[in-house]
Image: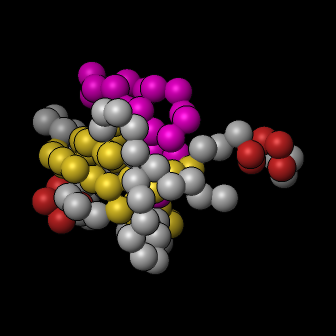
Amino acid sequence: MISFDDFAKLELKVGTVMEAEDVEGSEKLIKLKVDLGEDEPRQILAGIRKWYSPEKLIGKQFIFVANLEPRIMMGLESNGMLLAADGKKPIPLKPSSKVFNGTKIR
């Protein structure tokens, strides 16, 4: 169990995938450029390559954790996390209708 205060520290936002490409040398990672309503798109790495092709992600909105500390994977920096339901394959979470990039989830 975590406290509400701990949960409130998470910054969940809607973002649109502007670019996506496989990470060379990785069987798992896709590199995303995501518009989270900020001045510049963010680079976020997602371990969904086994189930999704990059071109099918472009233009789609998903929900991201926006305030994680940056993490280096395969020599690339990831500045957030794509949220996904854990089933037979990960199902990226998305809003039920289009919203502005950067819209907060609460």
Q: Nearer the viewer, residue 40 or 48?
A: 40
Extent of the magenta region: 63-83
Is residue 105 placed above or below 36 in the rendered structure? below
Q: Position of residue 77 (x, y in %)?
A: 34, 26
Q: Residue shown at 46%/77% (left/top)? A: 96
Whether residue 21 sits left or right of residue 63 in the image: it is: left
Q: Position of residue 14 (x, y in %)?
A: 45, 56
Using the rendered view, name the quadrant where residue 79 is placed. top left
Using the rendered view, name the quadrant where residue 71 is placed. top left
Q: Position of residue 32 (x, y in %)?
A: 26, 44
Structure colour scheme: secondary structure
Residue 67 colored in magenta in the image: yes
Disc tally is 0
Residue with the most extreme bottom position:
96
Is residue 83 visible in the rendered image? The answer is: no
Q: Residue shown at 54%/34% (left/top)? A: 68
Q: Position of residue 58 (x, y in %)?
A: 20, 58
Is residue 47 placed above or below 63 in the rendered structure? above
Residue 80 colored in magenta in the image: yes
Is residue 16 visible in the rendered image? The answer is: yes
